[in-house]
Image (cartoon, helix red, strand yellow):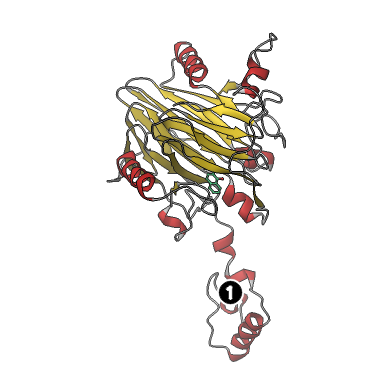
Amino acid sequence: MSTAEETPKAGESQTTDPELSALYRDIEAAGLRPLWTITEQLLTPTPRPRAVPWLWRASALRPLAERAIRLVPVERGGERRVLSLTNPGLGGRPYAAGTLWGALQCLGPRETAPAHRHTPGAIRFVTEGEGVWTTVDGDACDMRPGDLVLTPGGAWHDHANGGDGHMYWFDGLDLPMIEALDAVFFEQHPELRQPVAGEHNRSEREFLADGGAPAETMVAGAVRGPLDPEPSRLLVYRWAETDRRLTELAAASEEPLVSLEFTNPCSGASVLPTLSCGMHRLVPGGASRPVRRSGNRVYVAFRGSGHSVLDGRRFDWRPGDMFVVPSWAAEEHHSAEGADLFSLGDDPVLRALGVYREERLSAAQEITDVFR
Ligand code: 1HN
C-alpha cells in the first residue's frame, strides 16, 4: 500500500479502514488531535483573520450614542457608556478586530465615568465636543477634538464632563490581546472620581514647557525602534501640534499621503507597548499607494471625506466614521477634498516579536464590491 493512499488528506480523517478509524476515534477520546488533518488550517500561507474589513458610520453611531445618553446612566458596574465596534467576522465578540477593541464613548452634561484601572491599555481620540477631562493617575487631561489621550495599562482613570454639552470620543484598547494572554485584571477605585493633583495637564507641562529642547512626540512614518515596556509618560498629544506637523510634512513631500506616528518622548517607542497611534493626511485628490501589512488597524475619519478600498471593497467615509483593516487586507485611501485619518494599530507587538510584514502592491486594486 502506498503512503499516498493511506495518508488521509489534510482536514479529512474519514476512512473505510476499520483499524484506522479506530485510531482516529481513540485519538479523539484521548483528548488529542492529529496535526496532519489540520495542518493547512493552522499554517496558512498568509494571515487569515476572522475579522473582515468593515465600517461603522457616524450617522448610525452618533444618534444611538445620543439615545444612550438620554436613557442609560453611567454607573458603577457598567462603568462606561461605550458602543463597541463589533466586527461581523468575530461571531459576536465585541471587538473591531482579533487584537483590537474600538468603540465610541460618550458623556452627557456633568457626568462622570467612574475611576478604575485594568491591565489592558487604552487610548482616546476625541471626535466631538468639549468640557471633558480624563484623569490618569491624578493628572486631569483636558480633551478637545483631535487630541489623543493615553490611559496606559495599570493607570487609574476616570472621565468627567465639567460642561453642559455632550462629548464623544473613540476608545481603542488592547483588550483582546490581553484577554488572549489570560492577563486581564480589573479594579474599581474607592471613589467615583480619583483626586486630581494640582493643575490640569501636568504631563503636558512637564514634557513640553520645561524650557529644554521640545521632546519628540511624533515621527514621520512609523516607529521602528525597539519596544519600550514603559508606556509614554506624556499623556496628551494635542491636535494643534499634530496638525502643524502634518502641514509641515505635506509641504515637504510630493506624496499623496503623509503619515506620522505618535511616540513616547522618553524612548521614541510607540505610545503604549501594545498600541501604535498615527495620523494620516491625504492631500486633495490624493490616493495612497496600495499596501498590506500584518497586524490589525482601526481608522477614525477625523476631517474631510473620502473612500478606502480594502481587499477590493469600497468603503466611503465622512468625519466620525470608523473602519477596520484586518491583517494582510490590501488597503488604499482616496480623498477628493483632502482628509485626516487617525489610526490605531497592534504593530508594536508584531514588530517586537519579529513577525511584522509589509508589502507595497504595484497597482491600484480593482473595486469588486461597494460597502453600503
Ligand atoms: C474602559 O475602561 C474604557 O476607561 C473604555 O473609558 C472602554 C472597553 C473595555 C474595557 C474597558 C474607559 C473600555 C474600557
- Residue 189 in picture, x, y percent from top left: 65, 46
> As displayed, is residue 79 above or below residue 172?
below
Per the image, label 1 sits on a secondary structure element best described as helix
Q: Is residue 357 visible?
A: no
Can you identify the residue that label 1 sits on?
4
Spot the residue most to the bottom.
18
For the residue pair 272 and 138, the one nearer the viewer reads as: 138
Residue nearer the viewer, 346 or 289: 346
Q: Classify residue 358 by image quadrant.
A: top right
The residue positioned farthest toward the top in the image shown: 211
232 lies left or right of 141: right
Rendered view: 337 above or below 276: above
Please tell me in which quarter of the rendered image ligand 1 is found: top right
Q: Name the residue: 58% across, 43% down.
A: 192
- Amino acid identity at mark 1: Ala
Residue 218: percent from the left, percent from the top?
58, 22
Image position of 126 (left or right of 349): left
Q: Is residue 56 above or below residue 16?
A: above
Residue under the point 64% across and 18% down: 205
Taking the spot 61% from the left edge, 82% from the top edge, the residue there is 24
